[in-house]
Amino acid sequence: MTTATTGATGAAARPDTPRVVGRTRDRHHRGAWRWVILALCIVFAIGMIAPFLLMVMNAFKSPASYSSGGPLQLPTELYTEGLVKFWNATNFPVKLWNSIWTSALAALFGVLLSLLTAFAIGVGRIRGRMWIVLVFLLANMLPQEVLLYPLYTMAQQVGLNNSGWAIVIIFAVIQCAFGTYLLASVLGTFPKALLEAAALDGATTWRILWQVVYPIVRPTLSVLLIFFFIWTWNEFFIPLVMLTTPDSQTVPIALASLQGDRMLDVPTLNAGALLSLLPTLVFFLIFQRTLTRGVTAGAVK
Amino acid sequence: MSNAAPSIIDPTAAPAPSRGRAPTPGRRPSTRVYWLYLLPGGIALTVVIIVPFAMNLWYSLHKWKGGLAPMRWIGFDNYVDLMSDDAFWRSFQNSLWMIVAMVIVPTLIGIVLAAVLFDVVGKNIGTRTASFLRAVYYLPQILPIAVAGIVWNWIFNAETGALNEILRSLGVTDPPNWLGVPGLALPAVMIVLVWIQIGYPTVIFMSALQRVDPELYEAAEIDGAGWYRRFRAITIPQIRPETFVITLTCTIAALKVFAPIYVLTRGGPEGSTLVPSYYTFLNFFDKSKIGYGAAVATVLTFVIIVVAVVIQSLQARAERREEEGR
Amino acid sequence: MRIRSALSAVAVGALAVTMAACGSGNGGSTGDGGGSDASGGADGELSCGEITFWHYEGDDSAMNQSWLVAIDEWEAAIGGTVKVEKQTFEQLQKNAKIVLTGDDVPDVMEYNKGNGTAGQLASQGLLTELDDYAADYGWDSVLPSSIQTTARYDEDGLMGSGPWFGVPTYGEYVTVYYNEEMFADNGIEVPTTFAELEAALDAFVAAGITPLAEAGAEYPMGQLWYQLVLHHADRDFVDAFQLFDGDVDFTSGPLKEGTDTLQGWIDKGYINPNASGLTAEDMGVAFIAGKYPVMVSGSWWFGRLNAEISDFTLGQMIFPENSLNAGSSGNLLVIPTNAKEKDCAASFIDTALAQGAQNKLAELGGLPVAGDASVITDENVKVLTQNWDAIVADDGLAFYPDWPVAGFYDQVVSFGQSLLNGSKTPDQALDTLGTFYQEGRADITGE
């Protein structure tokens, strides 16, 4: 699993509202320089997305022209058979739905669990919180192979093997381990004045959580939600072993099944890759906006 | 919102704005209530992670083929065998290279990219351009790893790969056999990992830079410090907390790395890209040595814990020094 | 074995195939095949509801087509229904050991043959013993004896002896595919002897053409090596190497001679050194594109080659002068221990061995385990099947190089890569391989 985290620890004042003290147009910069640097950044960006371009290029190429010209030749026609084939071969709508609901629920529960636990640690300041955070952090660090065998056995005993719910539960917890680590530190810096004011009003902890804390950390939570969704979506190893029948499998597994088949046909595979990338891409674009808006909407100066 | 990176030593250590502790009027609700909030997370964690981990430990003390096969108690024999297992040592040696590829290189590139995007592109050209570029750099992070494997196999393929096609067109007669020779496969895998990882530190550092008080830069500029000096004297120290978070999370990810190896090389050629996770996997699924695989996984876990604790205590030390220095 | 034998269908048109009858179920199962407590009577009395069937063959593959025939026939005869749940090879390979311990298991499923796969499941108590069914249905007389090797496993999961645990319905073997045009264009004769083969390969090298399509990152290179080892070997060697019936010497004899031959082939430029990083897919695509004149690989490639090659004529021959060839039965149909409808599953397996299903296999080039090649009309399918029949008749199946011990696949791949890369001498490479082999063997037998 690639780790990707957010700068949720403190992502940030809005970049697009330069709170800069008036004189941004600094007298020193030499105009030409910035264009050179921009050009370099763009060249680097092209290098970064080149593999994606390669993928798109080969998704719409017929197997015959792929065999004769290889992956680098520009497609001569728009071949959509690959998409259709992948769609039908994997019964894509079913896989898509499985991926969506498991990822969404895992993300939701993961964020909720993180919030509750981090609330106890960061705001409640319970005793031994340092050790609790340590345990949560380590839980997120365990190699998945360690968990696989035992989890399968346990899922079987409660009748959750071959069920999306097993995926939801497992990943909600694995992600919440990370979310707790992060949120606890954010909430640790929570302005005491607000809490004390609420306590003076005689608010219960439940009300403090939902009416004082939640609105302020909401942006962080939404970033976490998006990350958890993308991570769960791309999970491969545990779902591969857990989900045994086609009607319960997720998109990445469908993709792997195509690959496992000897009859690997490159355009179909690429079309599948594109299709499985799209939902996460959409999510990512939403995330971009969240990040750009800044996660400090509620930050107290 | 202050941005102290979480520290295990005291995760809630707020750089409290008012250090003089005023006696708090209207005591906060007793902390005992808060234990209730810990329950759901605690139970879930126990069931899904702690218990399975304990079971894994138990497996590692047995000789077991898995399935319904009998488990034979052998105590620490698996661990003893590990010590004389070349593949095991090689896999951990490769972990060091994975750390280079997933932590050191991307972090360095990320700092530079973030600074350039934020300072130069963001301020002089437009934040939109900067966010767009940031999005592009981050893209590999959301790509399903299976797909990344396919795509990079085309790039590195010695015969038909994009990279060698380009090299041939530049007149190289015998371009390298990227994934076929031990000396090259590891660097090739590392290139892919760098590509995957770059976006992560870039995004985090960019948000960190937005925290930095612009007045610091203003002042430095008035003093006549150039861009590089400002970068060294202000930017680097200011983003230290994020650097720790990135170092910690990425180092752990590097120790756990599995999928990229699985899709690119399967530990080959000639075992040159074997990593601990993949070695565990091989023992579990190819060799049916569940006990032995569990032992590898356990060792890996302990290595991860040690590394995490070391990084955390370094961070705590750095923070304390900073506190005193204020 | 990681071999995926997914033969794609070949559009062979309608064939009037009349297969020699191959003992279809001639009696009911009365036994309790390894712990099934239901005892069915003869086929007629067997009453079945729904049985679940897991397999991982592509829709167009000969195996799948033949099983579809079996499903129709079985449903008509027995009155039950077969619910097919398509799996993926990757997945079953990884999770079968875990899944089969539960209750949610199929009644019959396809699984890879060999010590490292079906043998593992059998030794872990996850598969039903099929001896009684084999006797009742007469499978032991239907299947040629060399095909039966992969059906039986002892308590250590070693094939060749012990009870029946699976039933193969088709076969596979390693053969030589060649590009007739490339031979003709370069004025090179198609070889019939080993010496002629080497001469032909030399001639290609002299003409500036690398003759062998190869892949060192996956199974093909190891299979070529094994073919060369078998060139110097006899049945006793195979029994020792594969079935642990006798000692195996890694410093002299067939292993040494075959390895030296392979090293010679590499030195003479028969193989592109870049092959060490290429996959089987790369190899096949390059051969189909007409880049190499010769490809030594399995019959599982046949369907695809026959369908996709358009620019040249595909030739096939048994590896010259090899009386032993890499190959075996195809994947097995097995019945998990926790299956609920064992008797019904067994009668379904019997239907898959019956005439209808086997005819379909023959027609599509799927190498039936009990058949007659003389009735096939497609010329290429006919050659493939006749070669297969010849090898089976000579008892010439020698299994695969990575079968003997668990985890050997990776070792064999590394072995091939180190020869290709020149990072080890043949003796060093053999030594590494031998050490792993002996350890694995001791692990299985001498505990």
Image (cartoon, rainbow, N blue to C red):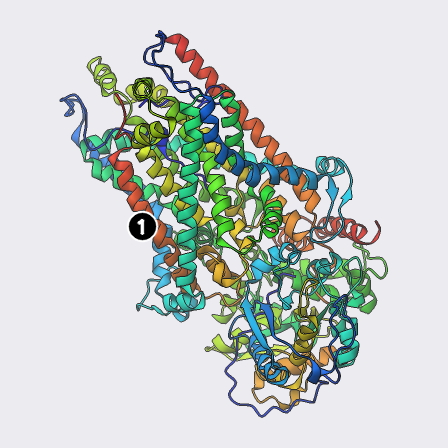
Q: Secondary structure at mark 1?
A: helix
Type of the residue with mark 1: Val
Q: Quadrant of residue C40?
A: bottom right
**Residue at the image point whose x is 66% and y is 41% from the top:** B294
Q: Nearer the viewer, residue B313 or C420?
A: B313
> From this viewpoint, is residue B264 visible?
no
Residue at numbered disc 1: A282
| The C terminus of chain B: image quadrant | top left
Q: How many marks?
A: 1
| The N terminus of chain B: image quadrant | top left
Q: Nearer the viewer, residue B111 or A4?
A: A4
Q: Nearer the viewer, residue B320 or A55?
A: B320
| Residue A83 point in image, percent of width and height | 37, 65
Above-or-below relation of C444 to C178: above
**Residue at the image point whose x is 41% and y is 51% from the top:** B167
| Residue B22 point in image, percent of width and height | 34, 7
Q: Chain of mark 1?
A: A
